[in-house]
Image: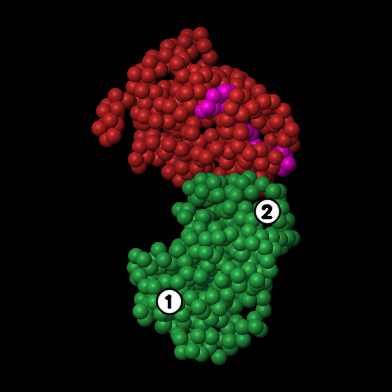
Chain colours: A red, B green
Amino acid sequence: MGEESGSAASVVSIPDDEQFDVTKEYSDKELALIANTVRKDIVRMLAEAKSGHSGGSLGLADIFTVLYFRVMKHKPSDPFWPERDIFILSNGHVVPVRYAVMARAGYLPVKELLTLRKLGTRLQGHPHRGDLPGLETSAGSLGQGLSIAVGAAYGLKMDGKPNTVFCSMGDGELQEGSIWEAAMAAGHYKLDNLIGFVDRNMLQIDGNTEDVMKLEPLADKWKSFNWEVIEANGHSIKEITEAFEKAKAVKGKPAVILFHTKMGKGVSFMEDKAEWHGKPPSIDEMKKALEELQETEEKIKAGEVM
Amino acid sequence: MDDKVVKEMNLVPAVYECEYDKIEKKPTRDGFGTGTAEEGRENKDVVVLCGDLADSTRASWFAKEHPDRFIEVGVAEQNMVGMAVGLALVGKIPYVSTYAVFVPGRAWDQIRISVSYGNFPVKIMGAHSGISVGPDGATHQALEDVAITRCLPNMTVIVPCDAEETRKAVRAAAKLKGPVYIRFHREKVPVITTKDTPFEIGKAQVYREGKDVAVIAAGVMVFEALQAAAKLAKEGIDVRVINLGTVKPIDEETVIKAARECGAVVTAEEHQVMGGIGSAVMEVLGKNAPVPVEMVGVQDRFGESGQPDELMEKFGLTSKDVLKAIKRVLERKSA
């Protein structure tokens, strides 16, 4: 075991440790490039850790990048800044994407990403509040985060504070009953300072969500719980931004964005494959994935993809 | 007159005078109502969440005085606990209140991960615990709540002995930075402590001095233990009575001292003996001062419908049962 991780450590490295200023205004192209860098980080982290959830982490890279570098009010130099927006990660298993985006935003050194899941790390396999400032909660058992977001939004409203609360959820996670307890409460309290979003990639561990336990008509479910529903392409920087802008403008009720995404986005052999939900790439697979992501980077730079 | 009852504990005079029938009775849940209402006056961050049981738990007493900080969540305990975490995240001191069978019972996963692993200052108020809930039967009689909270890292667990101690515990909980579980009851029980009785989280209090055997009790069983001790004094048996109060972190020093000085221990609780107060005491003694121990409590069975006093008798939770346990342990001690 020890020997294995020792040899892997010599193979995996993150050569580029550039961090980006969250106060800067980035173009869509620049954000697409940051998201691509985050995808490279995720692939490396998981290969080094030899375990972890590749699919959801890669699929959320664009959304998390837009959140941290364009939408959310936050300060990496002051993670407990009282005026910060609160970001609750309910689908805790995708935390590698949050670690990677946080590293690129300056919350932690980029090199630290390679400690993921190792003994003594701040980057636990599922998020642990207290280790890494900026991680708002502990999570890992699905269906708990939306309630926390509802409580935070309620508390902020009590005090007349303008902070927005964001909550990331997986689609399979919506099978948990507690999500709908929270959804009912948010609608009841008319929490328009709460924005939930769903990684609607149609996949969960055992297969397609509609085969495992049907979620559709999903938009209607949220509407019937008195939420405003917005749908968007979760891989278009422009659409993601517009969706968050629309959600922020909603008054008198909470908003949820159903982001249509591809699990494993950016790595062709992982895309839309349920088996990549909870699996890391091998070293060879990592190399292949990094080559693809390098090609994507060139294409983004050339303006061929966004 | 019982001159072994510790003067400095400032218990009600009837305890010193052995006039147990004359002690005023109040439900311990009243202490939750007054405790939060008082704390709310001094601390504007205090909020109370309620799962459709405002009158029953006495959350309504807080609501009446602080309506803007009272949050009705409906019949959704998992969401209530999650919301409390979110409220704590933005600086509030949330008290979550419902029956103990639901919280911590139903919402244990939220308590484990979001509250305890997240180490948020969520205060969990478990009402209607114990067999004394009565006619509602086993589904509503929380007999496992101490066991399932005590095993969680970061969690403080308090089992107050009466309404006054509950009030103090509820107020003291607000000052702790971490999560707290406080268990209380529906039934009226004797108020043996006064506002001058010392209370400190993590500190067991010796209510009666004694050297032959120590009864370490919590909740209403403290009263039963004092009665048993008074009776046995007449037979020349000298019983120390300790109100454990805080089950976690346990006051190891007082527990070990009692075992070493008395050489025999009886634990008493209105809870399953597995994982509860007796277990907590045994964990300390096994390591530090192994002496004979008898455990009064519910013996690995569910409760049932009945009147509270009938049930306390049937399940072996009266002063008579404590007395019998003392005799058993003394036999083992002398063997």
Look at 60% across and 49% down and name the residue there: B106
Range drawn in magenta: A187-208
Residue A168 location in percent, x, y? 57, 33
Q: Are the numbered discs 1 and 2 placed on the same chain, yes or no? A: yes
Residue B190, picture quadrant: bottom right
Residue B94 location in percent, x, y? 61, 54
- Answer whether residue B55 is magenta in the image: no
Does dot 2 land on a helix, a strand or a loop?
strand
Quarter of the image with the N terminus of chain B in it: bottom right
For disc 2, the marked residue is B50
Q: Earlier in the sequence, mark 1 or mark 2?
A: 2
Query: Disc 1 residue type?
Result: Val
Q: Residues within 10 Å of mark 1 (few under 14, many from 20)?
A: many
Q: Chain of mark 2?
A: B
User: Toward the viewer: A195 or B187?
Assistant: B187
Query: Taking A192 as reference, is B15 above or below it?
Result: below
Side (left or right) of A142 relative to A128: right
- Answer whether residue A192 is magenta in the image: yes
Residue B247 location in percent, x, y? 49, 64
Q: Chain of mark 1?
A: B
For disc 1, the marked residue is B329
